[in-house]
Image (cartoon, helix red, strand yellow):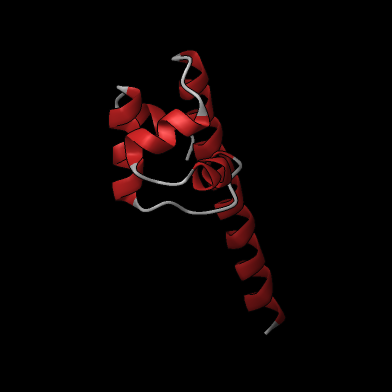
Amino acid sequence: MEKVAIIKDNIYMQDNKRLKNLGINIKSERLRRGISQEQLAELTNISRNSVSLIETGKINPTILKVIDIAKALEVDIKLLLRDV
């Protein structure tokens, strides 16, 4: 059972890193375009708080939200998914 717990912990840590990378990519592109979290929230129909949680890697957005974010930022989704 310990081996299973270790594997689960490793997967969890990898997922956290991937979510943080996604958030960093979104925030970088948002700032590059001079868009506030509030503006991005309005463009994507999500709350400003959710934008903040996504950018800090604390929540896992649906793929549809990531697509909406990419469209709002006018970037290819591949750019947001880099290193994820």
Q: Is residue 77 visible to the viewer in this orientation of the structure? A: no
- In terms of depth relative to the viewer, which is nearer, 43 or 5? 43
Q: Is residue 34 visible to the viewer in this orientation of the structure? A: yes
- In terms of depth relative to the viewer, which is nearer, 19 or 54? 54
From the viewer's perspective, is residue 22 above or below residue 74? below
Which of the 4 quarters of the picture holds residue 77? top left
- Residue in the picture at 55% in, 38% down: 55
Q: Could you tell whether 61 is left or right of 27 in the image?
A: left
Q: Could you tell whether 29 is left or right of 70 in the image?
A: right
How many numbered discs, if any?
0
List the single residue furthest toward the right. 2
Rendered location of residue 20, percent (x, y) = 58, 42
Q: Could you tell whether 6 is left or right of 63 in the image?
A: right
Rendered location of residue 30, percent (x, y) = 47, 23
- In terms of depth relative to the viewer, which is nearer, 2 or 59? 59
- In terms of depth relative to the viewer, which is nearer, 73 or 49? 49
Rendered location of residue 63, percent (x, y) = 32, 49
- Residue in the picture at 32% in, 29% down: 72
List the single residue furthest toward the bottom. 1
- Residue in the picture at 62% in, 77% down: 4
From the viewer's perspective, is residue 67 above or below residue 16? above
- Residue in the picture at 29% in, 40% down: 67
Which of the 4 quarters of the picture holds residue 3? bottom right
Q: Could you tell whether 40 is left or right of 9 in the image?
A: left
State the quadrant of the N terminus.
Answer: bottom right
From the viewer's perspective, is residue 59 above or below residue 18? below
Which of the 4 quarters of the picture holds residue 82? top left
